[in-house]
Image (cartoon, rainbow, N blue to C red):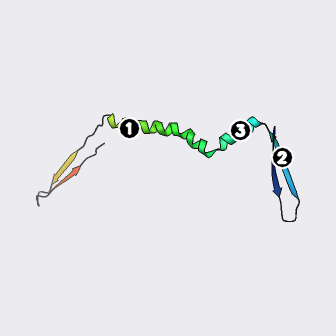
Amino acid sequence: MIEVAAVVTRSAGAEERVLTKTIRLQQCIEQALACNPDLKIERLNPQIEQWSIAQERSAFEPVIGGGTVRVTTNRWTRKSESRQGWRI
């Protein structure tokens, strides 16, 4: 059993109060592991690695594309316009 203490001061002239909480060693270790920022980052690394693998594999997947072209001609000035369609 571990005793955790915190000192609380309310104001400059007030007396100090000490709050204690008793927890087991296993609980203390679990809380330390849950709050460790380095471990939080390490928990995300496998997911980041999976995303990276999926991104690299996508270079070998087929790509489908298509498009349309619209040409209009003005009868009076003989100008033509061309517009490209979409592409994936």
**Label 3: how many Cα within 10 Å (few below 14, some 14–19, many 20+):** few
- Residue nearer the viewer, 39 or 47: 39
- SS category of the residue bearing label 1: helix
Dividing the picture into quarters, in which one does residue 31 lie? top right
Q: Which residue is mark 3?
A: 29
Front disc: 1 or 3 = 3
Q: Is residue 30 left or right of residue 2?
A: left
Residue, x 20% and y 47% (percent of image)? 69
Residue 27, image x, y percentages: 74, 37
Tag 3: amino acid: Ile
Q: Is residue 80 left or right of residue 54?
A: left
- SS category of the residue bearing label 3: helix
Dividing the picture into quarters, in which one does residue 2 lie? top right
Tag 2: amino acid: Thr
Q: Which residue is mark 2?
A: 20
Question: Quick one: label 2 or label 1, which is nearer the N terminus?
Answer: 2
Residue, x 32% and y 34% (percent of image)? 60
Label annotation for residue 86: none
Q: Which residue is mark 1?
A: 56
- Residue 30's place in the image compared with 76, above or below, is above
Tag 1: amino acid: Glu
Whether tag 3 and tag 2 are in contact, CB under 8 A, the answer is no
Residue, x 83% and y 46% (percent of image)? 20
- CA distance separating discs 2 and 1: 53 Å
Residue, x 82% and y 55% (percent of image)? 8
**Label 1: how many Cα within 10 Å (few below 14, some 14–19, many 20+):** few
Q: Is residue 6 left or right of residue 77?
A: right
